[in-house]
Image: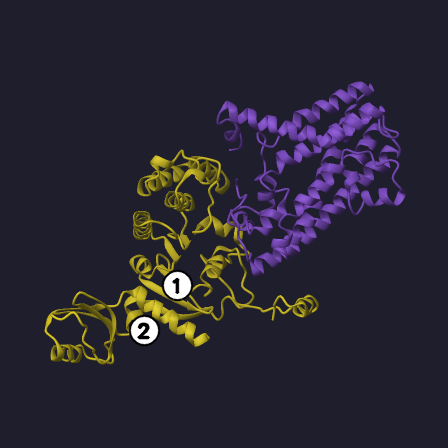
Amino acid sequence: MRSARAVDLFRNLLRPRIRVVEALRGIDLTVRRGEVVAYAGPNGAGKSTTIKLLSGLLAPDVGCVRALGMDPVRDRVRYVGHIGVVFGQRTELWWDHPIAASFEWKRVVWGIPDARYERMLGLVRELLGLDDIFHTLARELSLGQRMRADLALALLHEPEILLLDEPTLGLDVLARRRILTFVKELNRERGVSVVVTSHDMAELEQLAGRIVLLHEGEIAFDGIFAELRRVLTGRRVLTLETSSGAPPVLRGAVLVRTDAGRHEYAFDAARVKLSDLLEQAAAVTDVLDVETHRAPIDEVVADLYEHWLRGSS
Amino acid sequence: MDVLSVTRGPQVMIAYYVSDLITGLAAITATFLLAERFDGIGPWTRSEVLFLLGYALLVRALIDTLFNWNLAHISRRIGRGQLDHLLVQPQPLWMALLTEGFAPATGSGMLLPGLGLLIWSIHQLGLTLSAGWYALLVINLLASIATVLAFEYAWGSLAFWAPRASEEINSDTWRLLMQLAPFPLDGLSGLAVATLLTAVPIGLVAWYPSRALLGIGTASLPAEAYLLSAAIAFAAFAMWIFTRGLRRYCRTGSSRYLDYGHRR
């Protein structure tokens, strides 16, 4: 235990306590060619570690990673020529140079044939809207512009696999939409396999058909989004509009918010029937309007994370 | 790309070269003033001191030109988790380390002053130069550069194990070598000189190779043999420790990432 007490400081100096954390454990994951896989989990679950393993930046202690028939670490030089990596919190652009210069640098270092370079350059300039910023210094770009440029840079050599680690972190709605649309189009038209991590579940659902949820370095769920919803909970949201301002008390439902006669409840459809709740409400007040819908995926997953957090503490 | 940096405008270009020149002159001023005041330092005449200064400046300028962008200060890249940027490039790491730092425009500010000082001192000394002497000059410069880089990489590799504590260790090792390199070490005790020619190779940066080239002290052949052997030994040690660190890096990754200084 480390503390500021002198005795602990000396104890730590003589016999430091080192905790070894297993970032990933027993991961068995196959991504098919042309598939888009969303990779999610709470902070520290192992998402970025997986991206690093797939990029050849990390070697697993046990087990193996194979991609495109290669070992990402042993065959690194050949392998990285077939993948594109974007880390949302980093940039591959040369800071004091125009984007155009970074692109030219990539062409030379990656040895991209002229025809391919021109074709991909035209594509990314058009679809990611780079024309206005093509000759702007990287350090003068906004975060959204920089991410678009970074994504474009990662695609210039026409990779077969695209690894995106939180590519929309800190971006506004417009910049997010632009990047998501582009990645979807890239996957649809060119069959690029994509592994993308994010904390934004709605965004992941929009992008990927399949989601892999990590918890403490292990796969907690691997399937499609609809299946995730079904497995996790039958959670629904019920909104009642009543003549009186006070919300009726409904057994089996939790009042989430109330505002001027409009009351929102959360309930588990697997346990409570909607008709029972409506009967309860009608018995105590005039119900003017009813709305019901599934809980947003973000809330469903947040509940799951909270459940995991409580479980581990 | 490097040329693009300085050709952005006349003010930028002037600012680059003037600041480089001031830094370079500041590095050799102390030795120059001492030599001027006492008409030489120890057994070294004023012109020989100028030769030493020119040689030291040239070594520094060549490293700045060939290993810019913190490639000579590798502890920064390792400590800041920035090796990842090199590892995602489809080329062997050694090739990236040898090529990415090439900065002929922004790093060569002291190249001409160093060369000028060397030529002027040679003229003052009235040396008769042969093709063999020029070949030795090139070999000595390469050996000095290899020794400095090996020293930097050996110490810089500590950042694989202690990234935060060692991030700036190369700033100190660089200062240690470069600030003391232009001083003649004659007159120090035998133990001190032996230390400065082995464990802490300050003497191998400029003093010892300059002696060999000027024919001061030790006979030229054994001196050259020692210079080359030392450079090879330092390089082998640096490669050994760097490779061990790199293996660790590939197993544990970097626990910290700072974008500061990356390609800036």
Does residue A239 appear in the picture of this structure?
A: yes
Corner quadrant of residue B33: top right
> Which SS class for mark 2?
helix
The residue that mark 2 highlights is A232
Gap between marks 2 and 1, in whole Å?
Answer: 15 Å
Q: Nearer the viewer, residue A5 or A121?
A: A5
Furthest residue toward front: A245
In this orientation, which residue lies closer to the viewer: A122 or A277?
A: A277
- Where does the image place residue A84, in percent across and percent down from the top left? 43, 50
Q: Secondary structure at mark 1?
A: strand
Q: Disc 2 vs disc 1: Cβ atoms closer than 8 Å?
A: no
Label 2 marks which chain's residue? A
Q: Can you give x and y, in whole percent of width and height, for residue A294 in the image?
A: 23, 68
Q: Residue at x 80, y 28 (%)?
A: B34
- Residue beneath label 1, please? A40
Q: Which chain is displayed in purple in the rendered image?
A: B
Q: Amino acid at mark 1?
A: Ala
Colour applied to chain A: yellow
Inspect the image, locate mark 2, and give the three-letter code of the amino acid beneath it. Leu
Q: How is the image coloured?
A: by chain
